[in-house]
Structure formats: C-alpha cells, structure tokens
Amino acid sequence: MRTILYREALNEAMSEEMRRDEKVFLLGEEVAEYNGAYKVSKGMLDEFGADRVIDTPIAELGFAGIATGAAMNGLRPIVEFMTFNFAVLALDQIVNNAAKMLNMSGGQFNIPIVFRGASGSAGQLAATHSQTFESWYANVPGLKVISPSNPYDAKGLLKSAIRDNDPVIFMESELMYGDSGEVPEEEYLIPIGKADVKREGTDITLVSYNKMMKVALGAAEELEKEGISAEVIDLRTIRPLDKETIIESVKKTNRLVVIDESWPYGSISSEVAYVIQKDAFDYLDAPVRRVNGADANMSYAPTLVDAYLPNPEKVVKVVKDVMYVEA
C-alpha cells in the first residue's frame, strides 16, 4: 500500500464521496479559497466548484444551521469546524436540531450530516483551544461519534460517516494531520461502531482513541521491555461503543487501563470502566484504572501542558501498580 498523510486520507474520503454522490458538499471557514486551515480540503474547490466547497463567515451557529436544514431537504453536508472548541458556538444546532430531528419529526427527517474538525490539545494553545469533547457529544442520543487515530482508519470511517443517514461527529487532531500511514489505492469502508485491536497481548488491556493511541502504544513498547505484554485496543468509534471487543480482551488479560485525554469526570474512560465492572467484573484481577488529562483547565506554559496530558511514563506507572509490580 502507498503511504499518505492523515490530511490526505481525509481529503480522499471527501473527494471520493463527492464524486460518488452529487448531494455531498463541504462548507466551513476557509475550506475553499485557502484549501482549509489544515489543508485537508486542498484542491477540492478547483475540482468541485464554489457550489459544493463553500467558504462561510466566522459564524458556527449559522453555518451549522444551514447545513442541518440542507440535510433535512435531502442533501448530505460535511461541516468543517476549524476546531471543536469553536463548535461550542454551534451546539444548539448540533444537539437540539441535528441530533433530535429524526425523533421529533416522527421519523420523517433523517439528518445525513458530518460535523468534523480538530479536537483536543495541540501544544501551547491554552485553556479555550485545548479541550477534548468526545464525551460531550457521546452523551447525546441521536449523535454518532468517531475519533480515529491514523490515516487508514480516518479515511474508511469518514467515508462511512458521509454515507450514514444520521448525524456523525468526526473528531480529528491538529497534531495528527501530518502523520503518515498506509492506505489502499482501492476503495474501502470501515464500519461505524467497531473497535480495533492494534496490538495483541496477554497481561493487561490498554484502551484508548485518537492521538492518545500513540501514548498507549508507546507505553506497550516500554512494558514489553520489562516482560509485561499489553493488548492495545483503539476504540475508533466512541458512540456506538464496541463493548464486546473490550470485554473479550479483559476476559483474556484480566486487567484494564484506559488512556483518555479528556477530563476524568464523566469521561469516555468512566464509561468504559463502568462497562467492564458491569459485564466482566468476574474476570478482573485488579481494579480498572484510568490515565486522563488533569481535572483542570489547560495552561499555556509548556511545562504545565506536559504535566496536564497523559504520557507513556504515566501509563507505565499505573500499569505496574495494576500488575502489582514495583514501579
């Protein structure tokens, strides 16, 4: 397979689906003339024209509402938020209209729409530009939430999201757009709601998603040097959650640590821990542990950014505690 960048994988997914279906279009801030804030939509204006690749004003509530109305009328919009920190301004449209319209209309209106963009920290961007929102959206019935960690998964899942008849929140990362990975030339889809075992192991299960998969895999490599075999699961889809894959892994390893960039209170890690204590409690040889971002607002200072975020060293320490091995 050829190797391409994460941003190129997203571009291919959108372009292929726009060629396949003329009802698909892209709108957002700087997606057209500027080729996207992170160059994800590079070249799309030239190919598809200004009617299908649309620059919007800096008004997230407005263009999210336009896209929701377009979806109600049979189109299939892709909405790019420059960052999901800015999508907070569009929450009324996402949560009260897009997520609820199928139910409130008695099944008359599907909302085939994808809201996509960067989520989570990206260096020294401070408190209001460093937030991880997967758990917010996953809390809302009617929304599907996807958060892939690599180019292959990103392309296959974005194509599935665009074809889905329900609203999908597609969370990326500013720090992953330049990541490279193998992606097939031929078309493929990845089903929504299926996790992936990225590394087989026997002693402990590590569960994560998005860019924290790098932390999980890095920790697994360090643990291997010390004779601890870690199985690493990439959730990929946050809602619906693939409970079965996590449960089957815990049945094998008997221990679980969840790595989650978001705040610990009411997080995705909380939900995963609940699932395991409910459905796989008898298989546990130790309490489920979590490694989250700090329960605080992100600071600007680089030393505090490092202190805030999960890293392989923090994960290794927690794993050794779970394994009852001296750290």
Image (spheres, rainbow, N blue to C red):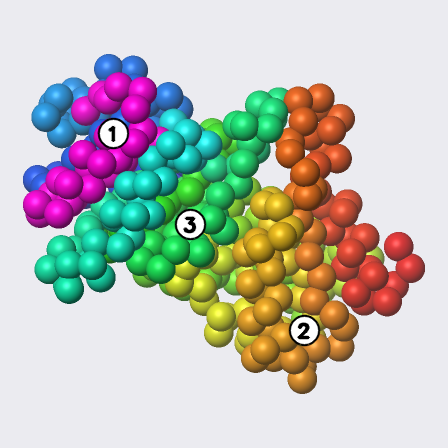
Kindly identify which residue carries mark 3: 137
Whether residue 45 is visible:
yes
Q: Is residue 77 magenta?
A: yes
Placement of the C terminus among the 4 image quadrants? bottom right
Which mark is first along the chain, 1 or 2? 1
Q: Position of residue 186 (x, y in %)?
A: 25, 48
Quadrant position of residue 199:
bottom right
In this rendering, position of residue 168 left or right of residue 286: left
Among the 4 quarters of the image, the one containing residue 202: bottom right
Can you name the residue that lies furthest to the right here? 326
The residue located at (54%, 36%) in the rendering is 131
Q: Is residue 16 left or right of residue 172?
A: left
Q: CA distance from mark 2 to mark 3?
A: 30 Å
- Alpha carbon of mark 3 to alpha carbon of mark 1: how far? 19 Å
- Residue 218 seen in render: no
User: Residue 62 shows which numbered tag?
Assistant: 1
Q: Identity of the amino acid at label 2?
A: Thr
Front disc: 2 or 3 = 3
As for residue 321 lying within the magenta part, the answer is: no
Residues drawn in magenta = 54-81
Describe the element under mark 1 as helix, strand or loop: helix
Judge depth for marks 3 and 1 and give the one in front. Answer: 1
Q: Quadrant of the N terminus?
A: top left
Determine the secondary structure under disc 3: helix
Label 2 Cα crowd, 10 Å radius (few <14 / some 14-19 / many 20+): many
User: What type is the residue that disc 3 sits on?
Assistant: Tyr
Residue linked to disc 2: 253
Looking at this view, name the residue that lies furthest to the bottom. 282
Residue at the (20%, 42%) spot, across then down:
68
Between the residue at mark 2 and the residue at mark 1, the CA separation in whole angstroms equals 48 Å
